[in-house]
Image (tube, rainbow, N blue to C red):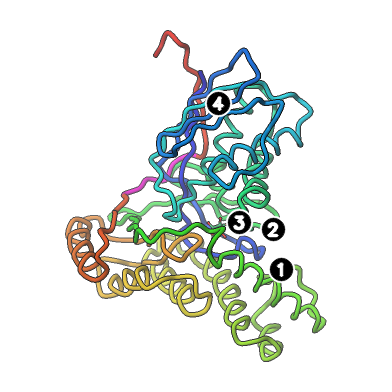
Amino acid sequence: MIIVRSPARINLIGEHIDYNGGMVLPAAIDSFITFEFESRNDQKCLVQSDIMSNDFSCSINQLPNKTGTWHDYIIGVLRIISKITDKHIQGFSCKMVSSIPNGAGLSSSAALSCGLAFGINILQNLQLTKEQIIQIGLETEHQYIGTQCGIMDQFAVTMGLQNNALLLNCQTQHYDTIPITLDDHQFLLVDSRVKHTLADTDYNKRRDECQEALAIIRSHGIDVNFLIDLSPEQFQPIKPQLPLTLQKRVEFVINEQYRTMMAADYLRNNQLLAFGQLMYQSHHGIQYLYEVSCKETDTLVHEARKQLSILGARQMGGGFGGCVLYLIEKKAIPLFKEQTYKMYNDTFCIEPLFYDLNICNGIHSSIINREEL
Ligand code: GLA
């Protein structure tokens, strides 16, 4: 039996710029989908999940078409693997147990698609590279789920490194590792429990808006392939040519790219105060320029600003709800949780959830003999 653990991810900063060719700063965290894979003697493919109803079952020779359910992740992964390898996929059984909350902006979907591809690859010795696993996860989102996401999530869950963030260039896919040493501080997540499904939200609309802005900018003779390649000096004279909404989107993208570069330097030099300020600035842009936050996450960040023990806070991930990431002093956490619970529940009648986290390695596997079970 092969056991695969596929982690969730956080993104320290650099939101919504992966698909604009930017730098992002994600890390894998210790919340997992654990898969148990076993070979079968027939051509059947059976996948069960502890949190989703309706097991997936099909013949590997007759993969179904899209269904509009969570099965599409499996169908997508299997179909894309079949396309990129000339090896025939054999029948297998897979049981999944997940501790990653769905719709919280922690990338449970990338953990699912990349973890599945990773496990099938090992079980059947398909010799796929990690780069191909990332690509399979990404294409599954694009072609089978309908989220036109960037590469950040699939990259982070596959390549994550314990106690390090990845400073990833989404154009070249080169990355540097940035050690995270926070001493008496730590990262903490508060789940607003406002759920989002990216395929159904304005996520794709934001991506379209960025494409539209890029097309207008290029039509004025500025030769850039991605929005983040536009310097502030190039942008200022062209800005009035864009509709107001697109001006705001571009401004956010340029600033967020700049913030990410600065943030990486601050982290390398242990300048946590300055790093925290960038988190607040990032949220400000997310709220007012990119407009992908919601009143619940805005309130959490607004309240955080009043606490000296919190160095920074921002809504994280695709947006429209999900989690707020905090950089907070360790000893302040118990009181913070108590007060935030009360404030949030009193204001919105929603009980927030708190996730302590550790930065861990990306997807990994172990082989277990039946006798060891
Ligand atoms: C989602 C997407 C990522 C990225 C973030 C926003 O998590 O899957 O590609 O765009 O949103 O930074």
For disc 2, the neighbor class at 10 Å (few under 14, some 14 to 19, many from 20) is: some
Magenta-colored span: 356-361
Residue 53 in sight: yes
Q: Nearer the viewer, mark 4 or mark 1?
A: 4
Query: Taking the image as four quarters, which one is ligand 1 found in?
Result: bottom right
Q: Residue at x 24, y 65 (%)?
A: 349
Residue 268 in sight: no
* Residue hosting label 2: 171
Could you tell me residue 269's position as x and y percent?
44, 60
Q: Nearer the viewer, mark 3 or mark 4?
A: 4
Q: Is residue 359 magenta?
A: yes
Q: Where the C terminus falls, by quadrant?
A: top left
Could you tell me residue 144's position as x and y percent?
64, 47
Mark 1 and mark 2 residues within 8 Å of each other at the beta carbon: yes
Could you tell me residue 106's position as x and y percent?
45, 51
Q: Residue at x 65, y 87 (%)?
A: 243
Q: Amino acid at mark 1?
A: Phe
Q: Label 4's element?
A: strand
Out of 359 and 69, give the one closest to the viewer.
Answer: 69
Disc sitting over residue 46 in the figure:
4
For disc 1, the neighbor class at 10 Å (few under 14, some 14 to 19, many from 20) is: some
Disc sitting over residue 22 in the figure:
none
In the drawing, does residue 363 fall left or right of residue 89? left
Q: Label 2's element?
A: loop
Q: Amino acid at mark 4?
A: Leu
In the drawing, does residue 363 fall left or right of residue 140? left
Mark 4–mark 1 Cα distance, whole angstroms, equals 41 Å
Out of 14 and 145, give the one closest to the viewer.
Answer: 145
Disc sitting over residue 147 in the figure:
3
Q: Is residue 273 above or below residue 160?
A: below
Mark 4 and mark 2 residues within 8 Å of each other at the beta carbon: no
